[in-house]
Image (cartoon, helix red, strand yellow):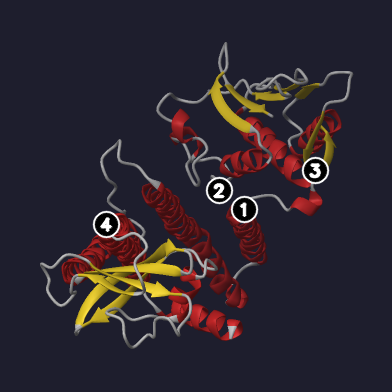
Amino acid sequence: MSGGRRRLGRAWRRRGPLRTRLALSVTAAVAVVAVGVCAAAFLVVRSALYEQLDLSLTQSARLAAQRNPGEAPGPLAGECRFLAAPACAEVVAADPADHPATRGLLPVDPAARQVAAGRKAPYYTNITVAGFPARMLTTDYAKGRALQVALRADTVEDGIEEAAGWLVVTAAAGVLLAALLGYWVSRTGLAPVTRLTATAERIAATRDPRHRIELPPPGREDEITRLAGSFNTMLGELEQSVTAQRQLVADASHELRTPLTALRTNAELLARADRLTPDQRERASAALGRQLREVTGLVNDLIELARDEEPQPLVEQVRLGALVEHCAQAARTHWPAVPFQARVPAEPVVVPGVPARLSRLLGNLLDNAAKFSRGGLPVEVELVPGVPGVPGRGPELTVRDHGPGIAAEDLPHVFDRFYRAGAARALPGSGLGLAMARQIARAHAAELTAEAAPGGGALFRLTF
């Protein structure tokens, strides 16, 4: 049986709409309370009415005993057939032979004989006399005898019926009010959820993350409002991600168009190699190889940029001093005409990270600095250890060149994908190196910034 109830409950939760279930739950809760209050009120009214009648019976029994002491079994006074008549009374003997039940004015049951014999306490009972409802008290009277006193209970019964009718009407009104209240609660309480659902469905249908859920004014926040605010924040992040993705695709297609066109031109030229001189064939082949390398590097950079975070299994403790010296030596090999000066502290500086990715970050910074260096001036790389246990005072790595520097209007955009300042358009590169460097830095909980160096040149600062 309990398993069946659980299955029905699961089916109800699975099939019923949330608004309907909430409305019915509120209605049922308020209805149960209303019916319970009305039932309790009915019992209180009924008890109070009978209590008044019982008090009258007790007083009538006391007066009858005082006026008729030691009477023989049989009727004492009154007739219960009339509503305005006084209480009717009768003496009952413990022995049925002394007072048969058929001779009395009031009905005599075995319990009354036990009261007369002293084996039972006085009690009240509801009876019918001459076709009318009555209330009777059976109490002790004398040794071997009991006194029965009865009063018409028409007014009490009518009062109970009237109270029951009004309480039934009240309970029905309470159930109706509960239904209206449940509907109102479900409608107003779930309004933010409805808006959230409508927004989610609209986004799913249009694939447009620019939609937002309307939030109430400040000061009226609740759990649903916080959920809607979090959903709006998520939509904002999604919109930024979609916009960045579309911009990346647009920029990549723009940047790839020129080298792909050059590749197709050189490939078509080499297809007619019989018409070219050996020198022309060599130049076309060299240009084709160079353009293939550029496209390969551009595609690899785009793949690197598409990664949002570093693979956790590859994270290890990286010695930044050794990494700086290794990258500086690789840069000297790649840029033999540019001197590189690396200054690292004697004590080891260790940070968690992926060595290959950090090498790529520093290599991009060094390549960028070497491209803009001039007149044999050096590229300076310096590593400064941080202060352990002090927030914001982690290790810091700086790369400085002595080139033309970064113009003020270009400074906010140096880390944008495919952005190339006017002075850099004639230099080799795809415009992705610094964007990739910042992405790697943020994936390692570091911040990469650019600024004008004192005395000229550009200064890139990597702070862990």
Residue at point 38%, 80% (across, down): 108
Task: Work out whether mark 2 precedes mark 3 in sequence or the reverse, and give the earlier one.
Answer: 3
Please say if 288 is above or below 367.
Answer: below
Task: Work out whether mark 3 precedes mark 4 in sequence or the reverse, and give the earlier one.
Answer: 4
Q: How far apart are labels 4 and 2 at the CA level?
A: 124 Å
417 or 350: nearer the eye? 350
Please say if 60 is above or below 347.
Answer: below
Task: Work out whether mark 3 precedes mark 1 in sequence or the reverse, and give the earlier one.
Answer: 1
Q: How far apart are labels 2 and 1 at the CA level?
A: 9 Å
**Residue under pointer 2:** 430
Badge nearest the viewer, 3 or 4? 4
Q: Are marks 2 and 1 in contact (CB under 8 Å)?
A: yes
**Residue under pointer 1:** 301
Give the residue type that dot 3 points to.
Pro
Residue at point 59%, 77% (across, down): 271
Q: How far apart are labels 3 and 1 at the CA level?
A: 17 Å
Q: How far apart are labels 3 and 4 at the CA level?
A: 115 Å
Give the image quarter of residue 167.
bottom left
Give the residue type that dot 2 points to.
Ser
